[in-house]
Amino acid sequence: MTGLNLFQHLCNLARLATSTLDNASSCETGLEKEQEFIRKCIESLLMASANLEKEAHSSLTSIERGLLMLKTHLEAFRRRFAYHLRQWQIEGTGISSHLKALSDKQSLPLRIVCQPAGLPDKMTIEMYPSDQVADLRAEVTHWYENLQKEQMNQQAQLQEFGQSGRQQGDFPG
């Protein structure tokens, strides 16, 4: 029974990954193959579970291998698209792993201080040993893009203020 519960859980996870692949239009490289691979794995797992009563040993072996392949594939997918997955998570549209949350609770966070050269702005990022370098890259990119937007807004306000001040000074009134 535990094997079947695990199978159901991984099927749900694979469906979630497939739906994520469907929605991932910004990552076009090879995602059609990813979706096809997951679909074939799910079909094989479903066929093996249907034959479980007839051929228990071979079906369980097929299920075990299929689950291992799916797990390995999802881990590789996570590493390969870690940057995009983290960006989506920062934007509030991503998914997070419950296993990662459990492992993060067991380890101490690493604090990384980022400061652009020549600017007083600083940011501290808390990362965990289980995080990828791509996760750090996504965090820094998001922070730096927001910092640049703030600086552009401040410059625009200063220019507006400077122009309105000159106009008032030119026409005493």
Image (spheres, rainbow, N blue to C red):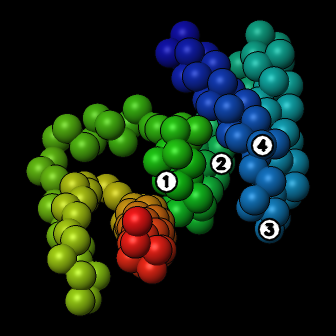
Tell me the residue that label 2 is attached to: 69
Q: Earlier in the sequence, mark 1 or mark 2?
A: 2
Residue holding disc 4: 23
Amino acid on which disc 1 is placed: Arg
- Whichever of callouts 1 and 4 sits on the residue coming sooner in the sequence is 4
Mark 4: few, some, or many residues within 10 Å (few <14, many ≥20)?
Answer: few
> In screen coordinates, is 125 left or right of 59?
left
Q: Which residue is pictured at 24% across the width and 82% down the height? A: 119
Residue ID at (16%, 41%): 106
Q: Is 65 placed left or right of 105 in the picture?
A: right
Q: Quadrant of residue 95?
A: top right
Residue 70 as seen in the image, left or right of residue 172: right
Mark positioned earlier in the residue sequence (3 or 1): 3
* Real-space Cα separation, disc 1 to disc 2, in angstroms: 24 Å
Tell me the mark number nearer the camera, choosing from 1 and 2: 1
The residue where tag 3 is placed is 29
Q: Are marks 3 and 1 in contact (CB under 8 Å)?
A: no
At label 3, which amino acid type do we have? Thr
- Disc 3/disc 1 C-alpha distance (Å): 18 Å
Spatial distance from mark 4 to mark 3, Cα to Cα? 14 Å
Residue located beneath label 1 in the image: 86
The answer to which image quadrant residue 170 occupies is: bottom left
The x, y position of residue 151, in whole percent, is 39, 71
